[in-house]
Image (cartoon, coloured by chain):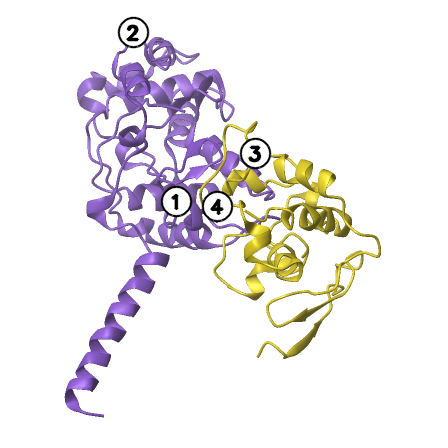
Amino acid sequence: MAAALCTIGGARAGADELRPYTVVGDAIPAPLTGAPGDPERGRAIVGNRQVGLCLLCHTGPFREEHFQGNLAPDLTGAGARASAGQLRLRIVDASRLNPDTIMPPYYRVDGLERVAANFRGKSILSAEQIEDVIAFLVTLKD
Amino acid sequence: MTEIAFAFRCVLSSVLIGTTLAAAGEIPMSERRSGYDMMSADTKAMQDDDTANPASLWVLEGETLWSTKTTNNKSCADCHGDTAQSMKGIAARYPAFDTKLNKPIDLGQRINLCRAEHQNATPFAPESRELLALTAFVARQSRGSPIVQDDPKMQPAIAAGRALFEQRLGQLNLSCAQCHDDNWGKQLAGSTIPQAHPTGYPIYRLEWQSLGSLQRRLRNCLFGQRTELYAFDAPEMIALEAFLMWRARGMPMDAPGVRP
């Protein structure tokens, strides 16, 4: 099962800016971009309630942020619990692992209903932003 | 397989199925809690004291409008008489089916229809100060009245509202039910997720620093999901209102409420 290789086009109809990626087991092992992500930028994205939105549902090691959610797992230790590839699939489209997940699909533009005009055809985060977030999350070892 | 093992498997299956349904399904009637019930003692006190509840200003303005005569020399009071009697429990029954229009309408639409049909007056705009004031004044007369949503003609709207409530919407791909059925009581950023029972509308929302309708509140959630908003009074809005009132059937009204 883990060895099963599914080739998944991120680039389907209406999604032509998204880059293709490959799911292997429960992960997307290869980065979405050529350049490595930046953990500092990633931390800022995770902490930003208009960009990453992460802290609306997750709590994390952000002492300066007072209102953090508890709908979803604590991000503390995320880098110890999951590999970069596992984190990547969970951010890109967690519904591939659990169709009922509350986690929004951060890198998918198809199969969505009634998206507001200013967000239509756009993924929640760009490929670069997702790599930045992963670069930050893998540093959360404990 | 032995009979005992088979029986055990059946019991286990039904337990698992029961768990699955409970996790993804409706809140049992006995576990329903209003937004009022879940708020802080301070906010409850603000709501309970008419002199501290900011919505009282709208109620007072509504009381004035209620007895203001329009161009054909008719006021609401001329037809409806003593509101404590005539309007008691009315807001608890909306949205309601209008046989003339052959569709469900909410309380704001009812007030505007009355103005057009009986008062020769122009309708108030959605969320206008006047419409909120009259709605608040009428809803105030239903304090303590149980919510009723039992007209068979409302069933199609309730069903449509339920479908909308359960449908994933917007860029964030979230349904109403995922928060308000499955995760109520948890923290979304700094806010406790309520069960979404519309017992207190129109509400004075501290975040708005103003009075607002249930439709305005629904649009807030849709905006947060990054969903294309429905227009005020769109059939989808009325259907969602009808479903939420049906879901809250039997719960007492506490309008006009104060909410965080």
Q: Is residue A28 visible?
A: yes
> Marks 2 and 1, how far apart in space?
31 Å
Instruction: Residue under label 4, please give it.
Output: B236
Residue at figure coordinates x 29%, y 50% from the top left: B27
Identify the disc placed on residue A89.
none
Which is more toward the observer, B113 or B208?
B208
Q: Amino acid at mark 3?
A: Phe
Colour-to-chain, purple: B
Secondary structure beneath dot 3 equals: loop
Q: How many marks?
A: 4
Instruction: Residue under label 3, please give it.
Output: A62
Colour-to-chain, yellow: A
Instruction: Residue under label 2, please give it.
Output: B51
> Between disc 2 and disc 1, whose residue precedes?
2
On the image, the x and y values in percent for residue B255 come to: 30, 24
On the image, the x and y values in percent for residue B76 come to: 32, 17
Camera-nearest label, 1 or 4: 1
Q: Residues within 10 Å of mark 4 (few under 14, many from 20)?
A: some
